[in-house]
Amino acid sequence: MSEQTADAASFPAIPTDTRSNFGRWGWTIVIIEGLMLWVAAGVQVHGLNIIVPVLSDYFAIPKTTLLFWATPASWGSVVAAYLVAKIVEAKGAKFAILLSLVACAVCFGLLGTFNSIWAFVALFAGVCFFGSGYAYVAGFALIANWFPRKKNLAFGWVTMGQTMSTALFIPLLAMCFGVFGVQFGFWAISALMIVLFVLVGALVVNLPEQRGCTPDNVPMSAAEIERSKQEQANYVAPFTSLQLLKMRDVWTIGIGSGGIFVVLVGVLSQLVPRLMAMGFPLNTAILYMSIAAFIGVPGAYFWGWLGQKVSTKAGLIIYSLWWLVAVVLNMFEFNTWTLYASLLMIGISFGGASNLTTSIVAEKFPRGAFITAFGVIQPIQGVIRCCAFAVLAFGLTYLGGYAGAYALLACIAVVNAFLFWITDTSPVA
């Protein structure tokens, strides 16, 4: 039986539905994944803004040294994309989430214990590996399992957690260091992961059918639910990782998704220095960055709604061109209004990347095969994403500063739109 036929048999076809009527247990899954993204984004990315200076002072290690080694350590998330996906295939998303939460909690808690750069590299690599594992690999697989038709909407809601982490995680971590000290401050955040471990253990199941619910909360009889449950239990992905690597669409999705993050990281990592270069004081630049982050919270839902309405492929093309306009507006110092327009567009874009680039995998590959394909596509995306700082450095050094660097990002946005335009998102047969 083809995957298309199997999916059709699993639950009835429904027209495009942009209502977030996920049901009680569906909303439970959405909220827990949103919380996991909030913590994971904080410990892997946003927290470095305060972790690096705190550890530098505590252990007398130069900040530049810690920052330098944080980059290769962060490649743990790229490795996790494949290895944790294999754990999900073998043991299910819930098992992978629980394992990764405990391991990430231990690695993060120990960051304030050992006065060694090699310990920092090993532990932060573990934080990136297992943080990506529970939130961005197994957590995304869980959403794809529960919402095969409404994945855009569901991802739109859960990526609000990632977006809110930009503005809220750093103050929380600073408070933990202030109240508990450096060593126990790290463990205070680890305690949040243990709370999530308890919530996942008590409330999460891999498939809605295991809870007596239905995919996307669509009406189904008890017999249809049981048949769908058995189909998913017996499903075997009809391709290997090597076969996936031979598919053109795997590469266009992986490279295009990576390019999306090159533009996103390129703009956000330099937004405060860029605003300062335009004449704004540091505090004002930070304020604008925070405002843009909060704008990104409803923006995450907007991109999910748009992808659900017009298809993920169309949503990604629009998203890429949206970034093109935002980058061009920020490239030149036109006037105050164009600056505000660019900041508004950048803010709205915060939550769209993780949402749409994951949804397109779930659109191309049915839920039984999602994690197999995601485990191949995500590392491709990660390798491309890691080029963001090299692109920025080249533009800033050789192309005349921010205007040249942003011109490169604008070109990448165009390439992204083209890659998604040529991608065939018809479900694999």
Image (spheres, rainbow, N blue to C red):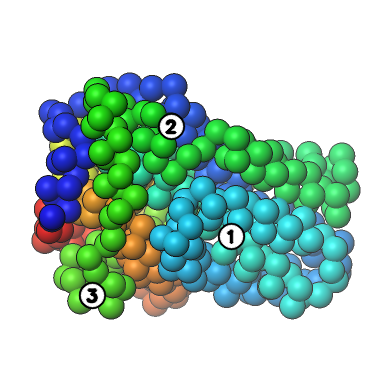
Q: Is residue 371 above or below residue 323?
A: below
Residue that mark 1 sits on: 130
Residue that mark 3 sits on: 243
Q: Quadrant of the N terminus?
A: bottom left
Q: Is residue 74 left or right of residue 113?
A: left
Q: Quadrant of residue 142?
A: top left
Q: Amino acid at mark 1?
A: Phe
Q: Quadrant of residue 314?
A: top left
Residue 327 image label: none
Q: Quadrant of residue 18?
A: top left
Q: Is residue 71 above or below residue 206?
A: below
Question: Marks 3 and 2: in contact by CB < 8 Å?
Answer: no
Q: Is residue 129 above or below residue 293?
A: below
Percent from the top left, x then y, of residue 289? 52, 41
Q: Amino acid at mark 2?
A: Arg
Crowd around label 3: few <14 · some 14–19 · many ≥20 (10 Å): few
Q: Residue at x 40, y 54 (%)?
A: 264
Q: Amino acid at mark 3?
A: Gln
Q: Quadrant of the C terminus?
A: bottom left
Q: Secondary structure at mark 1?
A: helix
| Front in this rendered view, residue 170 or 91 | 91
Percent from the top left, x then y, of residue 9? 16, 40
Residue that mark 2 sits on: 211
Percent from the top left, x then y, of residue 352? 35, 43
Q: Is residue 247 above or below residue 5?
A: below
Q: Residue at x 63, y 74 (%)?
A: 68
